Image (spheres, rainbow, N blue to C red):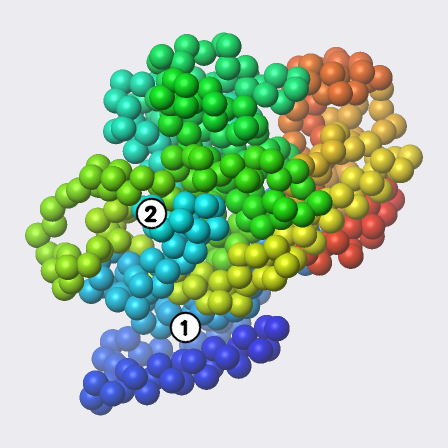
């Protein structure tokens, strides 16, 4: 596919060159010239430097949330970057702005918002969540923002940035929010995470909706990591209960640069009620004059944004529609199958123990030949280091409170406050075929 993408990119750039020359002949200023020899030398050194990365592209890498962009996406991004459009005002990138509106509409429809919504792409999920929490503050001034103890740290951090009081809600053993621990009269917005970044846990939106509606509390869904799993909501691979309720939320965040096959950075934020656009209203002395249509900068906290991100996502969605049986659905299904297969292999293993059954595509596990939490932590770290040292596998580590660990695995003794376990993120569909080999390699180090 890389070869195919390169060929498509070359042809696309050739067509763009004809368009560039249609405005009249011109020459690049001599101050911008770089000799062929210098360019070759620099890119030769650059290729060597880039080889110092971990093999994020290969199924042997099951560490952090790093999914290689699809060749269609990076080729489209590179093609757009030869123009370098800015999706702030329409005159900064009319075609890429229209493509952004188109892909955001597809995302809104995907999540059940229909034709009435407000949204745009962002540089990241952090910025997308910042905007969602900013709207939460503006919509319910003086009220707190609540989120679970499993939520991403960005919510607490962004509340600090926004000078908004926040409250962290404990998660009970049945995985429900401990809503009795908070005063609903003081809460303006509650965050529900569909796909935590730790172990891919899906929080109980079903429980929160009636409570939030009863007390007039807004719901924000952080689906930055898990959002594309909605393609499987009607399949037998996941429990679709929470995913089928997403349209009930007031706002949703999803990161196409995670499971959406996009280069960094491409996040997005969606609002169910387009009236929240009033909070973005501002004046600019030199933008928004080329068209009476909505400029994306008028509904964004960010100003300059890469139009190439919208172009890449648009091209990707042309090839991979947001459907269960076509496009993203089969891709997400393979990731889910990889996690289920890995979990099953570890259940049968005499050297590894799965921490809990995965809800999405992230598996936590630990060496079985231990008696205490401190021994588990030490051996997990040794395995983690050994795999990277001989480049046979790349994992990540995850810290769990020992009290929670012992609740699930009472046969072990807690002699430390926290226990460190191994963690694998199966983001690449190729890992469905590779996971057995990966488990074998891990076991060989125990």
Q: Residue 120 placed where, x, y %?
A: 34, 50
Is the C terminus in the top left, top right, bottom left or bottom right quadrant?
A: top right
Specify whether 392 is left or right of 78.
Answer: right
> How far apart are the alpha carbons under marks 1 and 2?
32 Å
Q: Which mark is residue 55?
A: none
Read off the residue under disc 1.
79
Q: Under tag 2, what secondary structure?
A: loop
Residue wearing tag 2? 116
Label 1 with label 2: CB-CB less than 8 Å: no
Secondary structure, mark 1, is: helix
- The local crowd at label 2, few if under 14, some if 14 to 19, many if 20 or more residues have their Cα within 10 Å, is few
Residue lying farthest to the right in this orientation:
350
Q: Do we see residue 287 in this rendering?
A: yes
Q: Say whether disc 1 or disc 2 marks the residue closer to the N-terminus.
A: 1
Q: Position of residue 228 (x, y in %)?
A: 55, 49
Q: Position of residue 131 (x, y in %)?
A: 33, 38
Q: What residue appears at the point 41 percent right and 23 percent down from the top-left corner? A: 213
- 366 sits left or right of 166 in the view: right
- Which of the 4 quarters of the picture holds residue 31? bottom left
Left or right, 241 with respect to 404, comes to left
Q: Nearer the viewer, residue 265 or 255?
A: 255
Question: In which quarter of the view is residue 172 placed?
Answer: top right
Crowd tier of the residue under label 1, counting other residues whose Cα lies within 10 Å: few below 14, some 14–19, many 20 or above: many
Say which residue appears at 43% left-offset and 80% top-offset: 12
């Amino acid at each position: 596919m890389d070869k195919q993408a390169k060929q498509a990119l070359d042809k696309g750039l050739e067509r763009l060159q004809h368009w560039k020359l249609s405005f009249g002949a011109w020459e690049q200023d001599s101050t911008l010239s770089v000799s062929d020899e210098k360019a070759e030398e620099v890119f030769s050194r650059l290729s060597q430097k880039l080889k110092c990365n971990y093999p994020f592209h290969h199924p042997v890498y099951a560490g952090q949330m790093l999914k290689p962009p699809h060749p269609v996406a990076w080729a489209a991004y590179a093609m757009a970057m030869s123009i370098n459009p800015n999706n702030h005002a329409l005159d900064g990138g009319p075609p890429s702005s229209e493509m952004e509106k188109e892909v955001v509409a597809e995302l809104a429809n995907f999540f059940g918002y229909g034709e009435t919504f407000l949204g745009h792409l962002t540089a990241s999920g952090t910025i997308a969540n910042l905007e969602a929490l900013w709207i939460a503050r503006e919509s319910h001034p003086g009220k707190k923002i609540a989120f679970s103890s499993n939520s991403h740290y960005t919510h607490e951090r962004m509340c600090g940035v926004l000078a908004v009081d926040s409250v962290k809600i404990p998660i009970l053993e049945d995985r429900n929010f401990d809503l009795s621990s908070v005063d609903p009269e003081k809460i303006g917005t509650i965050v529900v995470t569909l796909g935590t970044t730790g172990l891919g846990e899906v929080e109980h939106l079903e429980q929160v909706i009636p409570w939030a509606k009863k007390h007039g509390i807004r719901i924000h869904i952080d689906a930055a990591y898990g959002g594309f799993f909605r393609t499987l909501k009607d399949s037998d691979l996941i429990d679709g209960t929470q995913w089928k309720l997403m349209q009930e939320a007031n706002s949703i965040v999803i990161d196409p640069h995670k499971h959406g096959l996009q280069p960094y950075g491409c996040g997005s934020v969606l609002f169910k009620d387009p009236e929240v656009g009033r909070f973005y209203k501002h004046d600019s002395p030199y933008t928004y004059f080329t068209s009476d249509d909505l400029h994306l900068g008028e509904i964004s906290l960010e100003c300059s944004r890469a139009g190439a991100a919208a172009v890449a996502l648009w091209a990707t969605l042309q090839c991979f529609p947001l459907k269960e049986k076509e496009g993203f659905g089969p891709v997400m299904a393979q990731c889910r199958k990889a996690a289920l297969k890995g979990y099953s292999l570890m259940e049968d293993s005499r050297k590894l123990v799965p921490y809990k059954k995965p809800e999405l595509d992230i598996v936590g596990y630990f060496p079985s030949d231990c008696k205490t939490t401190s021994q588990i932590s030490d051996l997990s770290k040794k395995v983690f280091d050994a795999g990277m040292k001989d480049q046979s596998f790349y994992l990540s580590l995850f810290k769990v409170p020992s009290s929670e660990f012992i609740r699930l695995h009472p046969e072990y003794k807690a002699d430390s406050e926290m226990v460190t376990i191994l963690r694998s993120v199966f983001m690449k569909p190729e890992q469905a075929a590779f996971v057995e080999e990966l488990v074998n390699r891990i076991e060989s180090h125990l």
